[in-house]
Structures are given as C-alpha cells and as structure tokens.
C-alpha cells in the first residue's frame, strides 16, 4: 500500500498553498498510456480536465518543476480510465435495487428469493427479479422452478441473465395482453406450448416489448436512483465511460438531467433501439461533455444461450443447434440500415456466423458511402472464427467481445458440438487480424454460468482474456488458444473501447485527451497472468478529479482524507462533492473485489462490510448509501419532455407576408403528454391563425385522449366551386373560425391505429352574403355551428413521421356531419390517403409519392367542402382556390441532398375537384410545380424548415414553414 500513502501525501501538498490548482503534475508512476505494449510514461500534467503533457523522464520533469501542485505517484501503476463499450446500465442499476437470482438454481433458494421479490412488489404490483442464469447446468430446471413458483402469483417479470429472454407468469401475460392469439413480433418470439398457449418465455423483440411496458410503470426517480447506484459500482471498478444500450429516450433524458446537476460523472455514449426509429429521433440531440448519442442498435440474430422451460433433453438423433440462430436481417436490409444511419454510428448484435458474414459484406458494399469517422460495430461476434476476422477488418467494422463467455465454453461444446465450438469466441483471431476488440461486460447480462465473478469489472474481463483461467486459477477448457496479450487486453478496456463508442479523446493518456485515469494497487505487467483476477482499483479520476478511492486499508483512509481536503478546497469540483467521491460510509464502505475461489459469492470481499450492517438489497449496499441516492433521485422524479420551436415565414398571393412560429412538445415515453401547435400573423390583413394538437397517450389503458383545435381570422378568397375558377373573380373572406375535435385513439397492433372524434366547428363569415351571391343556390350553408362524429383508421409503416425516407402510410377517414351552419343539413364526407417513400439512393435521394381522394353525400356546407391550394396541396395556388364535393390529388416529389443539413426538392402536384351543379372544366386536371429548399434542424436534420416556391397556370406562391408537405 506504499503507493496509496505516497499519493495521499502528494495530494496534501496540492492544498497547502492554493485553493484551486489549475495545473497538477503527477510524476513517479508506471503509466500505461493506452498505446504500445507496456507502460511508456512516468509523468503527466492535468490542466482544465485534460492531459496537457505526458513524458517518460524520471523524477520531476524540469519543464514542469515550477508547478505548485505536484503529486508523487510513488511508483503506482496508472492507466487510462476504463471504458465499457457494451453495457445495459439502467438494467444493471435496477438489478442492484431488485431481487437478484444470479447463481440460484434450487427450488428452495429460488422460493426464498421470489418471496422477497413479492414482498417488495411496489412498482404498480409487478413482482420483479433479475439475473436468472440461462446457460450451464441446471438452467432449464431453474426456469421451471420459477414458472411453478410464480404460477398463481400476481404479475411477475423475471429477466434472464443473457438479456435476450424474459419470463412472465400468467398474470403478467394477461396484464401485457399476450395470449394464444398474439402474433410473434418482428425480430422476436413468444414461446408456446403444444396447444399454442404462451409458456411465459419471451425472446428478443417480444422480451423487449414486455420490458418496455414494465419499465414505463417505473417513476423517473426510480430510474435516476438506479443510475446513481450503478454509477457507484462502475466508478469503484475504474469505469469512466460507457457505451450504453440506453434504448429508452426517457433514460437518456435522465442522464442529461443528472449530468446538468453535477451528479453524473461517467461519460455516456448512448444507443437507441433500431427497431423503434422514434427512439433515435428523441435521443439524437444529445451532445455534451457527459452524454452523447452514438447511434442505433440492431439485432441481427439471437443469443448463444437458448433457455427452455424445463429444458427437456435433446434426442440423440437431433442435430446440434446453430450458434446465434438464423439471422433476422438480410444483407440488403443491413446495407440500407448502414446507409440510413447517415451521420450516426451503428451497432449490430451478431452472435452467429451467417449474420456476421452478411454484416461484413453489407459494410464493405456501402463503405464508400458512410461518412468518415462514423463507427459501425459488430457486438459480441461470438462465431467470428476462421476467415471472418480478416473480412471484418476489410469491411471497416469495430468489434466488441465478451471475454466472460469463455467460462461457458464447456456448455457451448455440449450444446453445439466440438466442431462448431472451435470457432466460437475467437478473441485471439480477432486480435491477430488487427481488429483490437473492445472487451465488454454486457452488464448485467454478462454473468457466467457459475456466477463466480463481478461481471461489471473491466479488470475481470482483462483477467480472463489474458489468462484463460478462473479466479481460482483453474484453466478453462478451450480458453488457452483464445487468450490475448496483456497490452491488447488493456487497450480493449481503454483506447480501443473508446474508439468503439465513437469517443476517441477518451481511453488514452496523451496531450489533449480527457484526464480520466485509474490507479491500480499494483502493475498488471509485474504479476503472473493468473494473478490478474486479484488486481484492485485504488482510485478513479474523471477530468482530473477523484471520483472513487478504495478505503479498506489504513493507507486508503489516509488517501481518502487527503483527497477530501483537496476536493473541499478545489473550485473545480464545487458542484456536488458529496456524490463525487465513493460515498459517505467511512471506513466500512463495501468494496466488491475479484474473488479468490470459484463458487457463488466468491466475487465479493465479504470482509469489507461490518457484521450486522443493515442492507437495503442483496448486493451489499448499505442504507446510508441508498438514502443518499434516494435523496438525489427525488429531485428528478418528474417526467422529462423534449420540445422544438421553429419560425414560420411565408407568402401567399392573398395573405401576403405572414410570420409565426411552431412549437412541438414530445414525451420521452409511450405514456404521457405530447403535442404541438403553430401561430401565424398576416400583417397586411391584421389577421391570425392558431392551430394545436394535444394528446395524452395511454390515458385510459392503451387508449390515448386527443384534442385538436383551431382559431382563425385569416382573410383568404372564395373563388367559387369546381376546378375552373378564375383568379380575377373572387370574394375576399373575413372569417372568425373556431374548431374543436376531441377524441380517443386506440392502437390496433404494431402499426395500426383507430380514432373516434366528435367534430365541432363554429363559423362567422362576414362575406357570407357575397359568397352566396357569387355561387347562387350551389353555395350551400355558410355561417353557424357544424357538428358530427369522425372515424379514422391509420397504418403507418414510415421510418419516421417527420421526414420519411422509406416506408408507406395509409389513412382513411369519415365525417358524418349532422348539423351544418346551425341547420339540420346532414352530409357524409369520407376520404383516404396513400403515401409511399422510395429511397433511390439511401439515405438522401428520396422519391416521395402521395395519392388521395375524397367524396361526399348530402347537403353542401362551406366548412365541409374539399379544397385544394395552399402550402401542401397544389402548391402555387391560393389557399382553397379549388372547392367541391369530390376531390382527387397527387404529388410526386424528389428530395435530394445539397450540403450538410441543407437539402432540396423538386415537386409536381396535380388535382381536381368536382362540384354538383357546376359545369365540367375543359382541363381534366389542375397542375402546379416548383421546387424548394429544406433546412434540417440539428442534429439529425429530419425535422426541417421548408421553403417552397410553387407555380400554377395563373398564380404563384412562396411558403416557408415547418415540416414536409407530407
């Protein structure tokens, strides 16, 4: 512990003469910089949270001897801060708060644990448990025990350790609405019995859909608390940055809120869920010193471990299973996914060989069209042996691996056979091919079958990757040929891992890099490989600020006191010092250490926790720590929302110049408020328009409450009825128009949705007499109340609702107007729209097509007529230039890139209206055309401002507004 004592003395010198050290020299260390094959530096200087200089001179370097703040490392081993490039951080944090089943197989042990979970079932009644081991001996039996123990209990949700499977009991399936008639989701599976009844085991997309439904019952405060708890654990293991499978936009919003308040010290590179494009739209704006958006995560295939209820023995004649299963995505789909990622990274869960082959071929095919510097990752790469490493290298893919899966090699050989297992987990082959794999934990889903180690600890991954042995020193069968050199393993949790999460100024001790570093209790280069399991992190620094120190020794306590004094006097950490450091538990802080023997629980340092201490959960955290986390988290218990504000500037031949703004607010969850609106003012007319939509999703179970409203006094023109109106023969309208449309919307499946509304409108048109005079008996009713029910049916297969680049949209509607103009004048109107988006050259060259039509039966009403003209339909003509009882119109629009977030469009619109009692026009269709510019809003550019110039046969118009025409 001499290193700790020396470091403590050095830190005391920092505070002896100044309250704020702008520059600090650390010298006398053995420093691995994240480059090379051994420690290559002895000192470094930290300035403003970054490394200002690094060198290998012995002692105090002359150029920096003048610095008042100097720390003698006393020969301590220093490495860049560890980066875990593949983690499920919130899942892990929740696992620390909920019942953990890791390592439990017997019915008695599981019964006790599940009884505890039932007693703590407070999150809206769900019994929650995590970490049930899915591989190895007894796994299927354990799952069978869980099924029987929870059969007659309330709703229960059990996450299996691999992260690709969950078990939900009968009451939980009923709450989720899963029964024999529920189809398997795309990319997932509902396991069923012989009669088609769900067994409760959900796989991949089915599991994640269920998880989403359960997570949405958690308060933001609970999620924030889980993040803080997980952060404590991560900092204790030297982790300073994570590549997080965040998936839920609300979780990213909470990361950002915690960071802004000074409570989040880890750096987070967040992934959205590729199967849900909206998660990317909501998450991609995250760019900051602590939280960044990486890109989408997609699932090419399944897990290497495949559990089954009661796991019946496989018949001898049955062929071995295929590692990773059949790929879900074709090469063409993978190419399209890579191209549509545009300026973001991508990650692909790929455990099988066929999936890896397809991904390598897809990446090679589109490599020249991917933006420079964007990272595409193959996660796990479980079956990437043979010639695949060279193909992956040629394709430009980065790779993450799970060294802890080496513990499962014997189980894999039993499942897949010796020949197939030979190419599994090829760490050495990947390393020799120059891929420099990132060593990851997949926490909390990366536990080994025997549960003998703390999966989160990067040093545990390094130890098994280098030694091929268990913490007790036992050789893992088949692992010796897969081990990699120590320097390569350390790069796998530092520089290579940082590159894999797209954050290249991390994971290195070099000039300009972020000053994130760890101090270990001894040098890994000076001990046998088998001893690597016993390495400990003594201190963790982020931005040059200590965020963790080990305190289970006298020297450690001296260092704690020195660091605390330094922090108290340092202006650079004035924000939240109480949660910057490990925790306020004093000498009794529980430290999780690599174990010295195999077997459940051996991964813990039991002696670090005093006998008789009170635990808040089964992971060893004490009440004081839990109380502090809860106090901090309570400030973040409100649901976050995102919002966008944009200007509206336009010109219309009738309105003249108009100005305004639009505001959109969106909940980060499927449950909550969202909506938007716009307001604009026409100065020449002194008139205005206000439009709005408000929705409360899941207001009544799955049903959403929706309200649309309108207030308008804009002066437009009435040109008459039909498609042959004249711009010279019109009446200026001067309306006061109020419209309300409250209703309910019900999802009917993954893409279908139905809506039912009560439509109400009131119109006072000061020019009504002139309209009737111009049109005669064909004008119909004008002023007064309008009322009737409305029904809608929508199928939405677009990749995003803002600026679709692929997919289709279908909608149909009907309005039954019972009252028009305050009179008993019924009218039935109905219509349908089909829009289709064709990526001519993904992701930017898009052909957008739209066709729509409508018809009506009954008495004519001014507000219920179909109209064409304005900024969306027949652009170039005045608003409502063409009016009638029936309508058809279509648009073809080519959208293309120009420069960065600026794109262009060329369009052709065509349409026609028919009006009863009006002669047929000479022209079968009215046509307009034009072009425009699109100004994408950062960071994705999918939310756009639109500037269009449209030209008709006798009019033209310019519009600058928010959003695409369709």
Image (tube, helix red, strand yellow):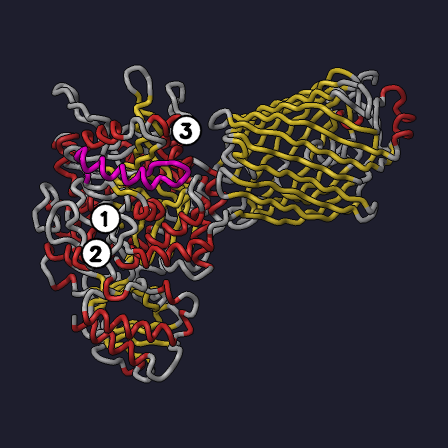
Pointer 2 local density, CA inside 10 Å: few below 14, some 14–19, many at least 20:
few
Label 2: which secondary element: loop
Residue 892 picture location, percent across and down: 62, 30
Q: Nearer the viewer, mark 3 or mark 1?
A: 3
In depth, the one of 521 and 636 nearer the eye is 636
Residue at 33% from the left image edge and 53% from the top image edge: 229
Q: Earlier in the sequence, mark 3 or mark 1?
A: 3
Q: Earlier in the sequence, mark 2 or mark 1?
A: 1
Residue extent of the magenta highlight: 104-128
Label annotation for residue 455: 1
Residue 664 picture location, percent across and down: 60, 44
Give the left or right position of residue 961, taking residue 564 as reference: right
Give the left or right position of residue 887, taking residue 445 as reference: right
Label 3: which secondary element: helix
Check disc 2 and report the residue beneath it.
Answer: 612
Label annotation for residue 175: 3
In depth, the one of 131 and 622 nearer the eye is 622
Residue 854 picture location, percent across and down: 68, 21
| Most distant residue in the left direction | 474
Give the left or right position of residue 527, taking residue 810 as reference: left
The Cα atoms of the two marked residues, 3 and 1, are separated by: 33 Å
**In the rendered structure, does residue 114 fall within the stretch colored magenta?**
yes
For the residues bearing labels 3 and 2, Cβ distance under 8 angstroms: no
């Amino acid at each position: 512990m001499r290193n700790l004592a020396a470091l403590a003395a050095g830190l005391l010198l920092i505070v002896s003469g100044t309250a704020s050290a702008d520059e600090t020299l650390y010298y006398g260390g053995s420093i691995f910089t994240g480059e090379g094959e051994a420690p290559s530096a002895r000192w470094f200087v930290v300035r403003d949270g970054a490394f200002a200089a690094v060198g290998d001179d012995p002692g105090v370097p002359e150029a920096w001897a003048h610095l008042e703040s100097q720390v003698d490392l006393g020969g301590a081993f220093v490495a860049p801060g560890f980066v875990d490039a593949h983690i499920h951080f919130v899942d892990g944090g929740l696992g620390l708060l909920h019942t953990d089943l890791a390592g439990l197989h017997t019915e008695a042990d599981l019964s006790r644990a599940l009884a505890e979970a039932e007693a703590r079932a407070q999150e809206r009644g769900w019994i929650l448990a995590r970490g049930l081991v899915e591989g190895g001996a007894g796994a299927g039996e354990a799952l069978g025990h869980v099924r029987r123990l929870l059969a007659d209990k309330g709703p229960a949700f059990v996450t299996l350790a691999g992260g690709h499977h969950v078990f939900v009991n009968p009451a939980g399936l009923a709450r989720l609405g899963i029964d024999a008639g529920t189809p398997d989701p795309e990319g997932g599976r509902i396991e069923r019995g012989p009669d088609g009844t769900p067994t409760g085991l959900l796989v991949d997309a089915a599991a994640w859909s269920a998880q989403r439904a359960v997570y949405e019952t958690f308060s933001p405060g609970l999620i924030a608390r889980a993040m803080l708890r997980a952060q404590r654990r991560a900092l204790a293991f030297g982790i300073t940055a994570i590549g997080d499978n965040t998936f839920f936009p609300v979780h990213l919003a909470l990361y950002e809120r915690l960071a802004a308040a000074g409570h989040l010290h880890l750096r987070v590179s967040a992934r959205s869920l590729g199967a849900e494009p909206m998660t990317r739209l909501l998450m991609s704006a995250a760019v900051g010193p602590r939280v960044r958006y990486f890109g989408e995560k997609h699932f090419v295939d399944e897990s290497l471990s495949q559990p089954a209820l009661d796991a019946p023995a496989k018949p001898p004649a049955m062929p071995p299973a295929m590692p990773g299963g059949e790929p879900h995505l074709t090469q063409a789909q993978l190419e399209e996914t890579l191209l549509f990622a545009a300026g973001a990274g991508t990650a692909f869960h790929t455990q099988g060989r066929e999936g890896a082959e397809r991904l390598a071929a897809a990446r090679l095919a589109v490599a020249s069209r991917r933006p420079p510097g964007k990272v595409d990752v193959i996660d796990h790469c479980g079956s990437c042996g043979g010639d695949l490493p060279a193909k992956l290298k040629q394709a430009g893919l980065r790779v993450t691996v799970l060294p802890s899966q080496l513990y499962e090699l014997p189980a894999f050989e039993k499942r897949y056979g010796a020949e197939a297992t030979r190419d599994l987990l090829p760490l050495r082959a990947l390393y020799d091919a120059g891929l420099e794999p990132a060593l990851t934990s997949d926490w909390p889903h990366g536990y080994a079958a025997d549960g003998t180690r703390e999966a989160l600890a990067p040093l545990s991954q390094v130890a098994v990757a280098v030694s091929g042995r268990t913490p007790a020193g036992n050789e893992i069968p088949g692992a010796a040929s897969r081990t990699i050199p120590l320097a390569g393993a350390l790069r796998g949790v530092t520089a290579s891992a940082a590159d894999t999460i797209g954050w290249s100024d991390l994971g290195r001790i070099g000039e300009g890099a972020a000053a994130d570093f760890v101090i270990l209790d001894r040098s890994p280069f000076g001990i046998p490989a088998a001893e690597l399991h016993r390495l400990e992190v003594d201190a963790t620094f982020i931005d040059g600020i200590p965020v963790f120190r080990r305190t289970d020794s006298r020297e450690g306590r001296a260092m704690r006191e020195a660091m605390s004094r330094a922090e108290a006097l340092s202006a650079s950490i004035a924000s939240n010092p109480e949660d910057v450091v490990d925790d306020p538990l004093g000498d009794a802080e529980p430290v999780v250490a690599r174990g010295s023997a195999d077997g459940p629980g051996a991964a813990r340092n039991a002696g670090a926790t005093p006998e008789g201490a009170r635990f808040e959960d089964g992971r060893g955290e004490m009440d004081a720590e839990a109380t502090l986390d809860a106090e901090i988290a309570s400030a973040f218990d409100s649901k976050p929302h995102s919002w966008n504000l944009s200007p509206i500037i336009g010109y219309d031949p009738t309105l003249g110049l108009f100005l305004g703004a639009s505001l959109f607010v969106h909940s980060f969850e499927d449950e909550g408020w969202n909506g938007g609106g716009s307001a604009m003012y026409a100065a020449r007319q002194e008139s205005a328009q206000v439009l709005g939509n408000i929705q409360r999703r899941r207001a009544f179970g799955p049903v959403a409450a929706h309200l649309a409203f309108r207030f308008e006094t804009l002066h437009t023109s009435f040109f008459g009825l039909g498609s042959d109106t004249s711009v010279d023969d019109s009446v200026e309208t001067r309306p006061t128009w109020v419209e309300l449309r409250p209703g309910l919307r019900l999802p009917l499946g993954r893409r279908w949705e139905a809506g039912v509304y009560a439509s109400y409108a009131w119109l006072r048109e000061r020019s009504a007499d002139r309209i009737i005079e111009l049109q005669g008996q064909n004008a119909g009713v004008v002023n007064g109340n309008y009322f009737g029910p409305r029904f809608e049916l929508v199928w939405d297969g677009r990749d995003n609702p803002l600026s679709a680049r692929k997919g289709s949209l279908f909608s149909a509607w009907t309005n039954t107007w019972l009252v028009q103009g305050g009179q008993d004048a019924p009218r039935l109107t109905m219509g349908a729209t089909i829009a289709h988006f064709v990526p001519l050259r993904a992701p930017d060259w898009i052909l957008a097509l739209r066709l729509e039509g409508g018809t009506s039966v009954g008495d004519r009403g001014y507000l219920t007529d179909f109209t064409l003209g304005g900024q969306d339909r027949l652009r170039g003509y005045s608003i409502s230039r063409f009016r009638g009882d029936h309508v058809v119109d279509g648009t073809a629009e080519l959208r293309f890139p120009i420069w960065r977030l600026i794109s262009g469009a060329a369009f052709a619109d065509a349409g026609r209206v028919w009006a009863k009692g009006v002669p047929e026009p000479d022209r079968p269709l009215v046509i307009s055309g034009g072009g425009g510019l699109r100004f994408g809003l950062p960071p994705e550019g999918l939310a756009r401002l639109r500037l269009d110039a449209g030209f008709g046969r006798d009019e033209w118009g310019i519009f600058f507004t928010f959003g695409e025409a369709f």
